[in-house]
Structures are given as C-alpha cells and as structure tokens.
Image (cartoon, rainbow, N blue to C red):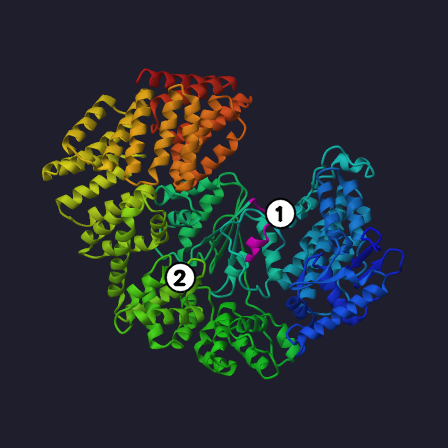
Amino acid sequence: MSRESEPTVSFGVLGTVELQVAGFPATPLAPAVRALLARLVLAAGRVVSADALTDALWGEQPPADATNALQLRVSKLRRALVAAGAGGDLLVTRAPGYQLTVAADAVDAYRFERLLETARGATTGDGPAAALARFDEALRLWRGPALADVGDAEWALAEAARLEELRLGAVEDRLELLLEAGRQAEAVADLERLVAIHPLRERLHRLLMLALYRGGRQADAITAYHALRHRLADELGIDPAPELQALAEAILRQQVPAPAPAAVADPAEPPAATPGRTGAAPIPVPRAPQRDEVPRRLASVIGRQDDVHRVLDRVREARVVTLTGPGGVGKTTLALEVARHADDALADRVHLVRLAAMPTGTDLPEAVAGQLGVAAGGPGPAATAALVAWLGADRVLLVVDNCEHVIDEAAELVEQLVAACPAVTVLTTSREALAVPGETQLAVAPLGVPDGPAGLAQLGDSPAVALFVDRARAVRPGFVLDESTAPVVADICRQLDGMPLAIELAAARVKALPPGEIAARLHDRFALLTAGARTSEARHRTLRATLDWSHDLLSEAERRLLRRLAVFRGGWDLAAAEQVCAFGGLAADEVLDLLFRLVDRSLVVPDPTTGRFRLLVTIREYAAARLAEAGETEAARDRHLTHFTELAERYGPHARSDADAWARLTEEHDNFRAAIDRCLDRRDGVDAGLRLADALFLFWNYGPRYEGIRALTALLAAGDPGPAARAAALQRIGLLGVYYPTAHTRAAARESVVAFERLGDPVNTATSRLVVAWEGQYDGDPDRYRAMVDQAIRERGDTDDPWWHGTVHYVEALLDLRTGAFERSAEQWARSLEWTRKAGDLLLPAGILAHLGIALREAGRPDEAIATLEEAAAEARRNPSPHATAFTLVQLAHTRLDRGEVDGVAAMLAEADDTARRSGNPRCQAWAAWGRARIGYAAGDEVGAVDECRRALDLLQEREFPWARRRLWSLAADAATAAGRPQEADAARRAAADLKAGR
C-alpha cells in the first residue's frame, strides 16, 4: 500500500486516549496499551527511548526483564493499531527506542495548541468575532479531562496538568472576548460555574465582576469581590491584586469603561481596528525573552508550581516584588523558576543578579554592574548611573537574589533603578522586605510536611518528603521510600520544619548515613530551626545550626580545607586551592580528594564546564569565622596574596599578546581585588600591593581602567613606597586615564614627570611626558603638546623598543587628527600600527586601524577608509577588545552614512552602543547616538534627531576632536531648526562657531 493510499489516522488525548481511523468508529483501547500509545503520541513523531518508555509504564518499579516486557507491550500496541485499521507500520523501531510515525496535526492536543495560537493571534488582528470562532473550534476538541484513562504516572499527571491549564487559559481568553463584544449575558453562567471550581483564580473573578456589572448587577459584582477578598484573607492571608481592588473601586463609582463601540457594534463582523480593553489583555502566544544570565534548571523543583503562578501574577502587577522568608526556605529556587517562566508578555529581557557572594560593605551598585557585564565607571552613584543607562527604557525583569546581608544598600539601589527606569520590574529575595515604595511582599512558606502518622501513599504525596526522596536518590540511586524508611523521612522533614535547604542537606547525607541516624543527629541540633527567623539574630542562629551540623560531619582535614577556602573571592581552581590551603597539617596532595568530598557534601559548588569551584556566601562567612577561631586568617590571606601575585606576574605581562593570558586574568578578577584589599589591610602592604599592581597594569589598561586608578590611588594613600615606586604609580594613574582624563589623572601624570626628573630617570621621564602630551587629543595648545613629544623623544634617546615607537606615532597621529592634518595623521597611524604589531600587541591594532580609517575618511579617501575600518572590525572580533569593537563599528557606520548607505547601519550602531555601554565607553555611545540622529534627520524625524544629538553631546562633553564636536553641533542646530526649536538651534550654532574659531 502506498503512503498516499494509507488511511487517515488521528489520536486523541484530550479526554480518554482514543484512536480514530477515517471511516471507522473510534476504537477503545485496552488498559495495557493506553499509556504506551499516549506517551508515543505526545512525542509528536519523535523517537522515544526505551528507557523513557519503561519509566512511563512502570515508574520506579520496572519488571525484572524490562526490555522484554516493553517489547511485549509494543507488540500489543501494533496489534491494536492493525485491528483499528491503522496499520502496524505506524509504530517503528528506531534507535534508541520507538517512534509513532504520525504528524503533529494527527494529535488533538497539538491541534488544540495550534488553534489556540491562531485564536490569540486573531485577537490582535481580525477582532473578537474571528478570535471567538477559533477559540470555540479549539475547545470543541476536548472530550473530557486530558489523559483521563492513563492512570496516575508522574509524566501523565504533569502533562495533563499542563494541558488543563492551557484549556482553562483558553476559556478565560474566550470569556474575555465575549465581554469585549458586549455579550456579557452569555458569559455570566460560565463564569459563575468556573469561579466555584477555581475559587482563588483572580482573573476569573475579575471577568465575573465585569460581566455582572455590565449586565446591570452592580451589587452582585461587589458581592463577588468581597467573597474573594474574604477567602484570600482566610486561606492565604493576602489581599486581592491591586487590579481587582481598582476594579471594585471603579464599580462602586460606576466608572468602569464600556466595551469599545467597534467591538459591540456587530460581533459577527470583526472591526477594522483592535478594540480597546478593560482589564488585562489577552494572553499572547508565549515567546521566551532574552535571559542570558538565568541558569538552566539542574534539579527538579518540587512543591512550588502554585507558588510560581502566584509570583508571576504579582510580578505582572507590581514594580517591585520581594520573596521573603527564613533562610533555606527556597526563595532563590522560586525566583529562578519564575524567571524561567517569564514570557514576552512580561519582559523582553530577564537578568539575574546574585548577591550571595558579596560581603557586607561591598559597593553594591558597582558589584551589580560588574555581574551584569556593565562597566561601572566608578563606585556608588557612577555605577548606579551606568546601570540606569544600560537598563534604559527596555522592559526588563531584574531578579536580585539574596539581599538580606546588604538590605539597606539593596533597597536604595532597587528604588533608584525602578524610579529611573519606568519599564523595569524587580523580583528580589530576602529574609526581610526591602521596604521601598510600591513593594509587594510575598511570604514563601516551607514545604508541606505530614501532620502525623499516615500511610505510605500519603507520606509520599507530601512535598517535603518528595523533595527528600528526590535529593536522596541523586546521591544514592537505590534509595527507596518504603514502609520502614517513610516514617523516618517524615520525622526528619518535621524536625526540619519543611525547610528545603535543610532537607536537601539532610538528604545528601543518605550517601553515607541511614535515615535513622540522620534523624537522631537532627533532634537536638536543629531545635533552633523552629524559632522565629524575622530578626537577624534568629536568622544567624538558624544558619549556624544548619552549618554546624554539616561541619560536625566533616573529618578534621575536611574542616581545615573548608575554612581556608573562605579567603577566595569569585571562585578558585584546584591549583589555587593546593597552593593557598596546603599548610599547617594539610598537604597539597590531599587537597584534590578533600575538595571533592566537600563537593559531595554540598558545601562547595563546582562548575564542571570551567573546572572552578565556589562557596555560597553563608558557607563562606561561616568558614571565615572558623578560620578566625583557628587563628589562621592572616596566614591564609597572605598565602592567597602570594599565589595571586605570582599568577598576575605569570600572566600579566602577556595580557595584550596572549588571549589565554587575558582570559585567565579576567577569570581571577575578584581574587585580584581581594589580594589588593589584603595589601591595604597590612601595615607593610604597600610594597606588596604595588608589586601586584605592576603585574596587573596591562590588564587594567585594556580592561577596567578605573579600577587600576582606584587601587593605585589607595595604595599611595596608605603609605610611602619610596620615590621611584611612587613615581611609577603616578605614571600609571596618568596612563590609565588618558582616554577619559580627569583632574586627578592629569595631575598624577604631571607629578610623575617631575618625580622622574628628580630621580634622574630619563626613560621614565620621557614616558610620563608622552602621557601628558596624550591629553592634547581633545583640548589645549597642540603646538605645546607637539613640543612635549619632541622633548620626550630627545629624553628617551636611541632605542629599539617597539612599544615606545608605536606610542610616539600614536600620540602624534592623535594630535594631527585633532588639528585636521588628516593625510599626515594617516601616515602616523600606519607607522604606529607597524611598531605595535612588532611589539606583539594583539589588542591595540584594531583601535589603531579604526583611527586610520577616520583619517582616511576625513582626507577624502572613503573607499580606503571603508576597507580599513572593515579590517579593524575583523581584528577586533578576532582578538576581542570591547573598546576597539565599539569604536570601529561606530566609525564604520558614520563612514557608510557619509556615502549615503543606510542598509545595515542601524544594526551596526545598535551593536556598538550595546558594547560601549557594557565596557563603560561614553565616547562610542555618543558616536552611536550621533549616527541615529543622522539617520533620523535624513528620514524626517527632526525631533528624534535633536534628542539623539543632545544625548551625544552630553556623553562626549569635551572629550572629542574639536572638528567632530563642531560637526555634531551643526547637525544639532539644523535638526533643532527643522523641529521648530529656534532657541536651541541658535545655541547650537554658537557652540559650533566657537569651536570653528578655536574658542
């Protein structure tokens, strides 16, 4: 029989499992094959492994010969297919299991989801009537509860619950459309029935209140609201959502908007425009937003499904939602699950900030910016401003985890971000509320525990017991909940008050201890877990009790290693642990085994992809206290300083010439910070700190320049390192500030010139003088700066140092570019590039090529400029340099605009802008805004062009070539004139004229 002549077969799971062949009545299926068919059908034509099918059919109690038993079931299903007229070849054997070769549309569940997507799309296109027809078609596919006769296997219950939730959502969407169409009389009866079935579902209550009010039953609508309010208070201790409260108020005042006239006029004919809405918009087709920082779920989330929906509802209504509760209750788990469930109806971007590794006293805005990859530009307000600029006007869900130990700083930062970014929603976790305006607090309750003696089935249904069993099987796969273990596990969960963290820690011990011994050890140690956890003292006792218990299970060698690991920041690798922690009774060759034991005991978190490890903040603080008790803090911190100084000296000199060295330095960024802090804490630490700073200089110079400036400034303030070391530090402060000079960095550069002259060091005097001359790229007398360059060359004398020659040509090229000597500048850039490549620098050539491209463009050689800038872009991507990438892209974009090319330029500017924001490069952000202004002005958007010009000017300040600023001011003047803003236009023309006149 050919494929075309085969009978049409369809399968149903929206009700009992059903097989339907065209021309034949629906075939009833034997119990032995229903579950197998359902599992294959729901795979929608994909291969299902034999292991997955075995698990679906028999769960945790497979038959002795599972392979043979599965083959028998498959044979029975093939016979059933043949008996129904479908043909046994629909079910094929295909490694590593079996496949039902049917299209997705042959399955009613997939047809339902497709129709549902179409219906929801119609709500924004053809109007209520067309959408209602599609919803009705989708809902008619249901014949009863999903998978009604499959049984209570875990996979079946989960899939049935998912489908039932989709069904209820479709019903709600359909009823909302009926109200839009003015057909509330048709909706009331269904709504009253559904509210009775789902008494806590607030959307149904909102729809019922609207239907009753629009049907002339104002009193009944208010009665429905109060019934919900009392029920929520009695059962959950919460109030109705703000949206419902506002609706009740509007009903009392008789100020509820009527359905849009276009929707009411003729429900049979869809209106031309999408009707307005009262209340929530229909649920759009879910689409996953960008969520780069949200980790994938690595373990099952148990007992939190209802909580996820509850939190999502609140996040849709409030700007700040805080999940509160005692330590270990599962706030982080819940917040991450909510982030994973966020769709584009809620946010376009989802970002996660973990505060757990941040000690008290941390500059929180700067730390948050660093975690998000945003260059802060400095601590405190500067970092906050950088975050505000990065978040911008985007719809962002920002998840901020573990706020309690920095509660004041977190509250201040969240309040500022929410106030400045109107489309940002923040979900935080903390043991106490942030207490910021507009905050909604949700208490995360412990998992339900058995109240007393119960049967095996009832105990297994307890979320707390289920969590224990799941985590116990992760470390001991053969663990079974049976008549002997179930009461003991239930007792453990009761003693731990249903707290997930404590339960998981207890379950991890099943690898080495029987449940009875775990229960005995918990009886006294965790009595404090039942105490109140609202105050910091109770919270600390709870955490200490949990960690004391875990600590007591360790060997003495494991305890030594755990407490010494507290000196690391941001993680460590095995080599670092061996070097830092191996002293005082702990040998280096013991560390590997001990570290893995700590991983097994859930005290150290591994990252298998990088080979690194870390401690959670509560465990690290506990370990630090143990380190102090042992009198080992100073020794461990000194060994940490020694190790990371040696590592910096190994990789630092190669930061610009070796991509692996750059990556290694970046990986240990937090540990370098901790090492600098150690130097600042020591009375004799200035020399050690400057040694470390010397090794890190190139890393700072091509990356976090402001951090190097801050560290060197603090070290100089902490003590007197001697004239030569001080002069070198001042020189580096000046060099780190040449791209964005401040009064402090300029003064440091000038002071270093004087200091090296006093020391009689002509080489470094020349270098410092060159650094001072570098400032001439933006302002000052260019002839004076050229004289400085000439003097520096004389002071340095003959040398074959390629870095020196490359830098001299670099500064001369900048001065020529500033003064408009473009041809000569291009020659200087070419020489600088040649010398820089001889020096083995992989990062700077892209920036030099970008400047060469500018010189060629301004010299009237656009084709060469385009080719050079494209080469620069390729160089920047080959040897990643965020500063060079952003600068190259904006200059390439402007050069294309000069030639009248628009295609692809907007995307180029967007990438440059994003890269510049992340790397703290306001100059490139300004050029990106300028490019958008040029595009907008050419397209007739004069107002938008004026706004973008203003943004560019604010970002640039005075840090740009005068001819470029003059050109930008001229565009601002033209755009302001066209936008009808004469005063702004006049001010811009005056600024341009001043620059032309050299004022």
- Residue tagged by mark 1? 287
Foreground of the two, 565 or 903: 903
Three-letter amino acid code of the residue under disc 1: Arg
The quarter in which the N terminus is drawn is: bottom right
Q: Which residues are magenta?
A: 337-348
Measured as percent of width and height from the top left, residue 350 is found at: 53, 48
Relative to 988, residue 156 above or below: below
Measured as percent of width and height from the top left, residue 806 is found at: 27, 33
Three-letter amino acid code of the residue under disc 2: Arg
Q: Quadrant of residue 485?
A: bottom right
Relative to 10, residue 582 above or below: below
- Residue tagged by mark 2? 614
Q: Secondary structure at mark 2?
A: strand
Was residue 342 drawn as part of the magenta stretch in this picture?
yes
Check residue 583 in the rendering and tell me which mark sits there, or answer none: none
Q: Residue at x 75, y 42 (%)?
A: 180
| Residue 460 seen by the camera | yes
Q: Quadrant of residue 706?
A: top left
Was residue 922 drawn as part of the magenta stretch in this picture?
no
Task: Sort mark 1 into few (<14), some (14-19) or many (20+) by Cα contacts within 10 Å.
Answer: few
Q: Residue at x 44, y 71 (%)?
A: 600
Measured as percent of width and height from the top left, residue 799 is found at: 18, 35
Foreground of the two, 762 or 178: 762
Measured as percent of width and height from the top left, residue 204 is found at: 71, 53
